[in-house]
């Protein structure tokens, strides 16, 4: 039976240098449940080291946590990879780490990068330059996500910074993106009107939450049987009665 | 000033459309945000960037940019070179950082404002 699942597929944790330190797995899960979300995706910049903790924190609740990562391509375009399981996102993380700009994070300049467990206990700090870019082209980023069975979504295309439209001017023809994400700062209907003209890609909206208040500020409704990657893929492609709706 | 003179003077390496170097560069524009180039470059500009994605060729055609210089030793993707070849857009490369190259172009008399 098809259900309408409310999804916010772009949430950072305290591992992202730019995110609030209160963005710990347990608090994120509690905030998501309080805002009646069914699915969230944990998308840190170029890392997935808090994904498993968030999945564990949601265990036994009604919330599904999708393992994900927000990857910075060589063109400095942000692309979200959503994956079926933690193993896949960690494989992607390896590829990203192998190609991430060298240098160490400066906590004073960029912020702390905290690795935590499902009880919100600090396990350590990442000293990688997660704010940096990889040397992987956007085409290769998308191919890498697809090889691991994931979905590739261009982040916040309505923003200038780090978006495909800002960095590359337009969406290259035949780029096999599974969806485009518009941020919550523009009206969903307006976004769909504006951006459906330039591309045949499906559109979703997410919060891109960097603090707890922002969680659930952008919601996409997936009409699917279950919150799996395969079902979400069908929904994005409008297949088998599955579809997506932007919540206003 | 002809692109060929710029190539010679700044010791650029030409990777595509070497038959189109007799074009005039009317001025210059430097940016790595392609959306910004689409909004603000002028017809006839030579464009200084470090973006190597094939989209740079489409932007150059759209804006009637006379040629693209990739700085800092950046190498274009293969697809970028073949598109540039078929669209007759010269792509040139230099090991110089953008600041140095733009200084040389300015000394040659090219301007960003005109």
Image (tube, coloured by chain):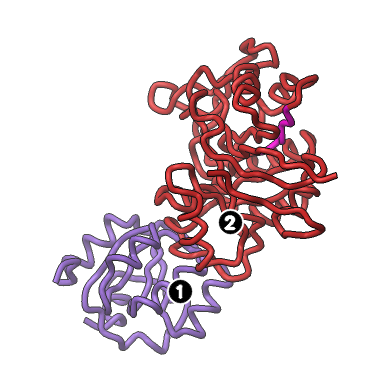
Chain colours: A red, B purple
Q: In the drawing, does residue A16 fall left or right of residue A116?
A: left
Residue behind mark 1: B57
- x 57%, y 41%: residue: A100
Residue A87 is inside the magenta segment: no
Q: Which residues are magenta?
A: A63-68
- Label 1 and label 2: CA atoms lie apart by 16 Å
Q: In the drawing, does residue B94 fall left or right of residue A181?
A: left
Residue A65 is inside the magenta segment: yes
Q: Farthest residue to the right: give it.
A: A1
Which numbered disc covers residue B86?
Answer: none
The quadrant of the image that shows the N terminus of chain B is bottom left
- x 50%, y 54%: residue: A189
In front of the other: A38 or A200: A38
- The picture places residue A54, in percent across and down from the top left corner, at 69, 24
Secondary structure of the residue carrying numbered label 1? helix
- The picture places residue B35, in percent across and down from the top left corner, at 38, 61
Residue behind mark 2: A138
- Identify the main secondary structure in magenta: strand
- The picture places residue A197, in percent across and down from the top left corner, at 51, 68
């Amino acid at each position: 039976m098809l259900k309408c699942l409310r999804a916010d597929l772009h949430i950072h944790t305290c591992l992202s240098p730019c995110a609030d330190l209160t963005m710990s797995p347990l608090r994120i899960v509690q905030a998501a449940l309080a805002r009646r979300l069914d699915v969230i995706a944990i998308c840190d910049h170029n890392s997935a080291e808090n994904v498993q903790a968030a999945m564990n924190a949601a265990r036994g609740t009604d919330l599904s946590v999708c393992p994900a990562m927000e990857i910075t391509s060589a063109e400095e375009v942000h692309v979200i990879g959503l994956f079926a399981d933690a193993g896949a996102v960690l494989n992607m993380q390896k590829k990203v780490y192998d190609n991430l700009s060298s240098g160490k994070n400066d906590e004073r300049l960029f912020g702390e990068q905290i690795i935590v467990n499902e009880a919100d206990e600090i396990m350590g700090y990442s000293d990688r330059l997660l704010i940096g870019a990889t040397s992987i082209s956007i085409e290769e980023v998308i191919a890498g996500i697809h090889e691991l069975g994931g979905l590739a979504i261009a982040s916040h295309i309505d923003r200038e910074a780090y978006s495909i439209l800002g960095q590359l001017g337009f969406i290259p023809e035949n780029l096999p993106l599974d969806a485009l994400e518009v941020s919550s700062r523009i009206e969903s209907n307006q976004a769909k009107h504006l951006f459906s003209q330039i591309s045949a890609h499906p559109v979703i909206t997410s919060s891109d939450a960097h603090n707890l208040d922002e969680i659930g500020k952008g919601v996409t409704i997936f009409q699917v049987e279950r919150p799996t990657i395969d079902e979400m893929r069908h929904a994005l492609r409008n297949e088998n009665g599955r579809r997506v709706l932007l919540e206003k | 000033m002809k692109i060929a003179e710029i190539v010679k003077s700044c010791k650029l390496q030409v990777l595509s459309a070497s038959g189109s170097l007799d074009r005039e560069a009317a001025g210059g524009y430097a940016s790595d945000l392609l959306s910004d180039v689409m909004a603000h470059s002028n017809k006839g500009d030579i464009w200084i960037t470090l973006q190597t994605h094939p989209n740079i060729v489409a932007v150059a055609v759209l804006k009637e940019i006379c040629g693209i210089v990739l700085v800092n030793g950046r190498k274009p993707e293969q697809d970028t070179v073949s598109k540039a070849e078929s669209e007759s857009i010269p792509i040139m490369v230099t090991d110089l950082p953008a600041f140095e190259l733009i200084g040389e172009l300015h000394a040659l008399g090219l301007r960003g404002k005109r």
